Structure formats: C-alpha cells, structure tokens
Image (cartoon, grey):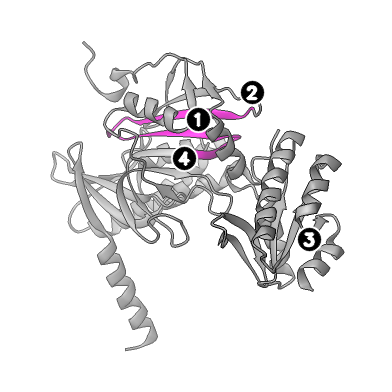
Amino acid sequence: MRDPGSQAAALIDSIIESGELIINDRVRWEQREGHLKARLSVISQRYPGFRLELGKSLNLPRFTLQLTFNTIAARRYCSNNTHSVAADCPDYAGQRLQGPHKHRWSDETGDECIYVPDDISPDSLEKAFYDFCAESGIIFNGVWIDPPLAQLGLEVA
Amino acid sequence: MTLCENVASHLSTYLSQNIVCGPIEAGYEVLVTPLLYPDRDNIELFLTETPDGLIRVSDLGQTMLKLSDYGFVPNRAPRRRAMIYQITASLGVRYENGSVLVDADQSTLGSKVWDLLMAVQKLSDLAFTVPAYVRASFSDEVEDYLVGRNIQYNRGVQLYLPTGYSFIIDFVIQETSLVHVLSANSQSYARERASLVYQNFMELREAQDPRQRVAVLDDRSEVWSDNTSIPMSHAANIVVRWSKKAELERVLTT
C-alpha cells in the first residue's frame, strides 16, 4: 500500500482520472457535535484506502464533501466558505474568494490550494454529491439517503 | 512615529480592512475575518441578537465540522475533549452542541469576540495533533536535507519546455540540476511513479535542456526492481539512492 505522505498527489490524480473508483455503500448519517457526518467506502481495485465523507452543518445550509486517501484530503468541496488563497497557489493566488470551492491535495501545499468547480451544484447536497462523484471519477452504485430532518432542527411531517 | 507605532498603525489598518461583513446566511449576519483555518478557509463568525438584548457571536459549529474533516473526532478520545475544554475555558468562551460562542453587550463586544476568535483559531490548530495531517512526505525529508547542507533549491517548479511539454519538477538545485524524488511502498506505484519520471526526463532530453537530470530513490522500501530503475537510468543522468548520502551530496553540489 502507498505511503500516504509521499507523492500522493500524482497517485491520486492518476486514480481519479482512471475512473476506477466505485461506491456500493448506502449513505448512513451519524450525529457529531454541531454537524452530521456520513462516511462511505470507496473501492479501488489497485489501491485500498479511499473513502468519501459528507459533512452537513446543523445550523447552516453549508456542507462539505471530501474524498480521502489514507486520511489525506485528496479533494474537499466546501459549499459556501470564504477562502484566502495563498500566494503560491496556481489559481486565484492572493485572492479572497467567497462561495463554493474545492480543495485539491498537493504534496507541496497540502490542502491549502483550491479551484472553483463549475460542474458541482452548491444548491442541494444530493445534487452536489452526485456532481462531486462524477467530477472525482467515482461510480456511485449505492443508495442516497437525505440527512435526517429532525437532527437539522426541521419539522418532520 | 516610532517603529512600534508604525507597526501598530499598519496592523490596525490591515485588520479593519480585512474584517468584513458577508452576505446574510440562514438569518445570521456573517463576520468574515482574516484568521484562517489550517486549509486557509477564513474563520467566519455568525451574529444574532438574543431576546435580552445581547449580541450572540458563534462559529455555529464550523470549527468542529472542519476538525471532523481533518479526522479530529472528540467523542472517541477523552484527551481530545479535554483539550477543547482547556482552550474554551482559558479564553472564557462557551462550547455548546459543537458551537463555540459568546454573548456580549456593547461594552464587552470587542474583547469577547477577540477571545472567541482566538479560541476558534486554537481549536482549529488541534488538526495538527492528528498524526496523518502532519506526516512528512519524502519530499519534505529531501527538503530538510537540502536546508541542512545549505544547498540552494526551489521546490515544486513548473517547467515549460520549448517542445510545448510542461510538468512540475520536484526540485531545481542551484539552477544546474533538475531533481525528481521517488518514494513508494508498493511495486505497482513504484512502476507508475518511475514511468512518469522517465517520461519527464525523456522530454527534457528531447528539449536539450542542459541541466543534469537526477532521480533520487527512497530505497528504504524494497520496491525498486531492475525493471523499474534501469529504464529510468537511461533517461536520467544520475540515479542516486537516498541511503547513499555521500553520493547524493556530491551529485547535488558539483
């Protein structure tokens, strides 16, 4: 198995581009402190260690979608945070961006650099989930379950 | 104006220019600050008035959501929970249902919000207690080695060749050597990584780049077979093993 700390970026990129990642799991939400979390196993024939995590704020419409590889945040989508881009990042260097963005792992800068994807819908967690899977080369054969409304402080009919 | 007054003035200006109000979200006014989470997302605070006329300022759980993404989950580790309470208690802020918050009146608003910001910043830095988050890469080790020997370098340099090919070289050493570092814990990834380095070096050779092409192999794992390393030696000028430090120093300094 790969050492997650060394030269992970090239490996992650190649696996994402290969389209070999598959999820067969059902989305299962669990309550954490101030948010809900769901974690899905991601199957790769060549490299174990991938996982998809969904985080949903209990207080705001915000959510995160994260593909991890041996605990490295390979990709992380933030639906509505403000981000200050470092001067040595390839995109938007030195700018402050408000709104949806995606962190992309680099061996040099970790998860600090972002880009703004134009094919992930920030309006709906479910839609964004499917878009995120498509953009990350993940085939989703599992079952989507909405976050439980009661835990979000909403009325359940 | 003294140096200190000058710095204080500029810092004050910087803060006032970079603490801004964002769009209202879910009924909350949003204060965007220049302080950053470890991934450089800005720390944002959410404001509302309480029924008794105080101003409630809260992170609305964003810090714990961020820590959760980093793998810091307090409910499984009493020591982690203790760290959270130590930080919040020392700064006099509340921790409720995953949110860090203060209630303040006009006379205490500035100092309480500052304490809240400090608490959020300290909490977010708990990400650095997650071993996976701070694990050094082989590139980091090579960089430490270069720093220790006072060898001038640039790391992660994008190269654009006259042929139109472009790629990122791991290190440019003293403008005379282009270095790729290779580390793997499986033979399949070793082949994959070596193949990419071979391709980059062949393109450099095709472009007649005069700098020497150096491959540094992390040979602490026995993954570098002849079928992997021999083709690379055809494209590189030198393939040197990490365990041969004397040879590595000679290659990089001459």
Disc 3 with disc 1 on a shared chain: yes
Chain where mark 4 sits: B
Residue at 36%, 88% in the rendered image = B2
Element at label 3: loop
Marks 4,3: beta carbons within 8 A: no
Q: Is residue B38 magenta?
A: no
Say if residue A67 shows up in the picture.
yes
Disc number for residue B67: 4
Front disc: 3 or 1: 3
Horizontally, residue B32 falls left or right of residue A14, namely left
Q: State the image coordinates of residue A72 (x, y, percent, origin top left).
A: 56, 39
Quadrant of the image occupied by residue A46 = top right
| Residue placed furthest toward the top | A157
Residue B202 horizontal/vertical position (percent)? 69, 54
Q: Chain of mark 1?
A: B
SS for dot 2 = loop
Q: Are both tags, 1 and 2, on one chain?
A: no
Residue indicated by mark 2: A45
Q: Nearer the N terminus, badge 1 or badge 4? A: 4
**Both labels 3 and 2 in a single chain:** no
Rendered view: B149 above or below A78: below
Instruction: Please state which of the two labelled residues, at mark 4 or mark 3, is closer to the viewer.
Output: 3
Q: Give me the C-alpha separation between circle 1 and circle 4.
A: 12 Å
Span highlighted in magenta in the image: A48-75
For the residues marked 3 and 1, what is the alpha-carbon distance in whole angstroms? 53 Å
- At horizontal 80% and vertical 56% (from top left) the residue drawn is B239
Q: Nearer the viewer, mark 1 or mark 4?
A: 4
Q: Which residue is mark 3?
A: B237
In screen coordinates, is B231 left or right of B154? right
- Considering every residue shown, the one lying at the far bottom of the view is B1
Residue B153: percent from left, percent from top: 65, 68
The answer to whether marks 3 and 2 mark residues whose Cβ atoms lie closer than 8 Å is no
